Image (spheres, helix red, strand yellow):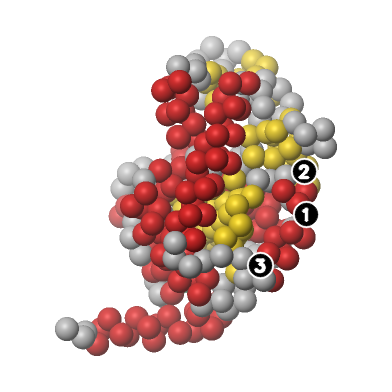
Amino acid sequence: MMNHDRLELLREALPYIQKFKGKIFVIKLGGTVTEHSATLHSLAEEIALCHQVGIRIIVVHGGGHQVTRLARRLGVQQKIVLGRRITDDETLEIAKMIFAGKINTEVAAALHRLGVPTVGLTGFDGQLIRARRRHPQRIVDPETGREELIDYGHVGDIESVNGQLLALLLEHGYVPVLCCLAADAQGNIFNINADTIAAELAANLDAEKLLLLTDVDGILLEKGDPTTRLSRLTLAQFKELLASGRLAEGMLPKADAILGLLARGRTTVHVINGCRRNALLQELFTDEGSGTMIIPT
Ligand code: ARG
């Protein structure tokens, strides 16, 4: 049965397809998005469609959940200090297996099976990201009020980004799939926050959009209540929201990465539910979207 309402969708999509052609979008996949193959395959179709209409896509993924799960299976104790994971020697081994091995291969393969030419990468391939070990940090324990020095182990911060290889790949129609490992000049490998990588790449490549795919419907005022989703925010409104302390906890680690990028004034940031079928297409190709859009003005 051909339904005319359904065809209206293509008309609505036309201006966006025209506008986005040739533009760079950085798509960051959160851990829950890549964990289940049905979710990943469904999302890969949406990404393949974006690629097909000429959007230049870079995929970045994390996968902390899966690291935790494998660690548990291997009997490797995970050290969490004040809610923060410490990447010790054994956890780094697992992170390499999960990030560069399992998830990177699975994401690239999900796109490959739809005919998308992919290239799987770590942060140090082509000297893309230069990282350094994170210095031990003073954190106040909210329970005791005491200050503690926390050494995160093999966790790195980004020192610089060199988008040359990515630009080259995009130029030739490849979709780079990047995991969240990077290294310093001595070849020490670090676990890097994937949201930060995605935001830094978006800035470096002057991306049109940074799309953060999570397992919630966007920025919600009340945790777990999708009816409190904010559909559209300006940078100023986003800052206000941060200052008010109303932002759900899960968003906080992303906030820093997003703020820096928005402040440059070139990239729009979207927070979308990557686990919900069609959420990405709805966000990009309809007027109302599906998640939260933050505009840099
Ligand atoms: N499709 C348009 C775009 O990507 C508008 C999206 C609106 N999204 C929203 N959450 N209000 O630019």
Residue most extreme to the right? 185
Residue 280, how many percent across, how many down? 42, 63
Disc number for residue 162: 1
Point 72% across, 48% down: residue: 125
- Image coordinates for residue 48, horizontal then vertical, percent: 47, 67
Q: Quadrant of the N terminus?
A: bottom left
Residue 282's spot in the image, x, y percent? Answer: 39, 69
Q: Are marks 3 and 2 in contact (CB under 8 Å)?
A: no
Label 2, residues with CA under 10 Å away: few <14, some 14-19, many ≥20: some
Residue for badge 3: 170
Q: Secondary structure at mark 3?
A: helix
Asked which quadrant contains residue 11, the reply is bottom left
**Mark number displayed over residue 130:** 2
Which quarter of the rendering shows the C terminus? Answer: bottom right
Binning the other alpha carbons within 10 Å of mark 1 as few (below 14), some (14 to 19) or many (20 upward) gives some
- Whether the residues at callouts 3 and 1 have beta carbons within 8 Å, the answer is no
Q: In the image, residue 93 lies at what x, y percent?
A: 59, 27
Nearest to viewer (mark 3 / mark 2): 3
